[in-house]
Amino acid sequence: MSGVNEEFLALPLAVLADAALGRARQLGAEYAALRVVSTRSQYLTLRDLAPETAVTSDDVGVSVRVVHDGSWGFAAGLVLTTDEAVRLAERAVAVARVSRPVSSERVVLAAEPTYADRVWSSRYQIDPFTVSDQDKVAALLELTERLKAGDGVDFTTAALQAVRENVFYADSFGTTTTQTRVRVEPSLSATTVDTATGAFESMRTLTPPAAAGWEYVLDQETGLADEVAQMPELLAAKVKAPSVRAGDYDLVIDGSNLFLTIHESIGHATELDRVLGYEAAYAGTSFATYDKLGHFQYGSPVMNVTGDRDTDWGLASVGWDDEGVAGQHWDIIRDGVLVGYQTDRAMAALKDLGRSNGAAYADSARHVPVQRMVNVSLQPDPDGGGVEDLVSRVEDGIYIVGDNSWSIDMQRYNFQFTGQRFFKIDQGAVTGQLRDVAYQATTTDFWRSMEAVGGPETVYRGGTFNCGKAQPGQVSPASHGSPAALFRGVRILNTVQEAGH
């Protein structure tokens, strides 16, 4: 099945909208929008074959947001009645009136077509919340038993996150939308201990989160079962692998690692509110300042990056954002040059960029929609080859697989990333694993060193449920398509030696 949740559709959504928007118009609001949000989330974990955590939560609420006399106003509540909708509209206008004397500029919203009575749903077959907890635990337990049975696996964990998000939006321009998004994330990890040396290593599955239902966990094509079969051998080799020698290396970085570098050094760096300094308290601003648009060489000529909210598989994909803007796609970096940003309606109007590209989102009714990261993806080379082709071009280098820890400065410029699996490349061939690897660079040096991008077959669809931003803090989901890519002369640190210093 795939469709808007029937429970949600049974709520008095249109009645609430008429009451709130009508009152906001009476009070002189230039723009008013009502959102009703119902989100169900679940987190299950197993540790060493025993259930450890099982938490299911519901978050339901209603909010009204207005522009009145050029200032934003916002109010949120829990009760889904017309009286409460009217009260929230009045409170939102009152907040805008209080804000007007201290507002340095007037809010203007970029124009957008009207979408009346539209309905949208992400693609899924089985709503994970129609599956019993017993069945979910049984599926995780079966995978964990296979992993635990592997030679050298001493400890295991398994986890499942699932979210079903329903949003009703109506605004004073005439747009009314109802949509459902479902997403799941299964993961397993294993730890081995070398009793002779006391060394230990861990490894996690690479199966990414997906805009899908419970069928994704069961589908053999996701590769989860294959990963579980391969991990014990990979883990046993990793714990005995030599520690890397620090220095400059050519790198072939798999999409399962590179997607996180895209997220941190491109995704956040090209959020226009961060670029313009409207977002600074949470993780800083951006080096990719507005004066660079259209001519700044962000990376090498083989670098092409898009933003979107309309791919079938994207965690950030929607029918319409939380300002009534339809999902779309656009270029952020073309032939290595910065050509676009991620925008909401106010940021797009502020810089006369025309239509917003639909980046507004709030993770609940009680939070104000802010500009959030969309699906940001590095495009593959249509004629590119596989990972083996990239590796064949390296004499002395490292092949990096899987994401792990990261660190990046408040301008999204200086960074350091680690990974899960590191393989030595010698004379065009992978020869064995390494340990304690981290790569360090500036954003521009790194992306300008990219010599080649893999073909479509190398694309990995990574992502996160919990990208953080704003104060009070909010989380949002985003995906990143990433092919494997070849980088020349990147600085490699030995993490054990660095920790010793």
Image (cartoon, rainbow, N blue to C red):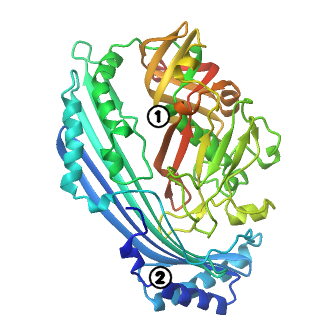
- Looking at the picture, does residue 423 appear above or below residue 156? above
- Looking at the picture, does residue 405 appear above or below residue 219? above
Which quadrant does the N terminus fall into? bottom left
Circle 1 SS class: strand
Q: Position of residue 84 (x, y in %)?
A: 47, 87
Q: Residue at x 32, y 31 (%)?
A: 226
Q: Residues within 10 Å of mark 1 (few under 14, many from 20)?
A: few
Q: Which residue is denoted by mark 2 in the rendering? A: 13
Amino acid type at circle 1 is Ser
Mark 1–mark 2 distance (CA, rounded to whole Å): 43 Å
Q: Position of residue 217 (x, y in %)?
A: 32, 46
Q: Position of residue 186 (x, y in %)?
A: 34, 45
Amino acid type at circle 2 is Leu
Q: Is residue 410 visible?
A: no
Q: Residue at x 31, y 26 (%)?
A: 231
Asked if labels 2 and 1 touch by Cβ distance under 8 angstroms, the answer is no
Depth check: 228 or 46 in front? 228
Q: Position of residue 151 (x, y in %)?
A: 21, 21
Q: Quadrant of residue 116?
A: bottom right
Q: Which residue is denoted by mark 1 in the rendering? A: 405
Q: Quadrant of residue 490?
A: top right
Depth check: 320 or 501 in front? 320
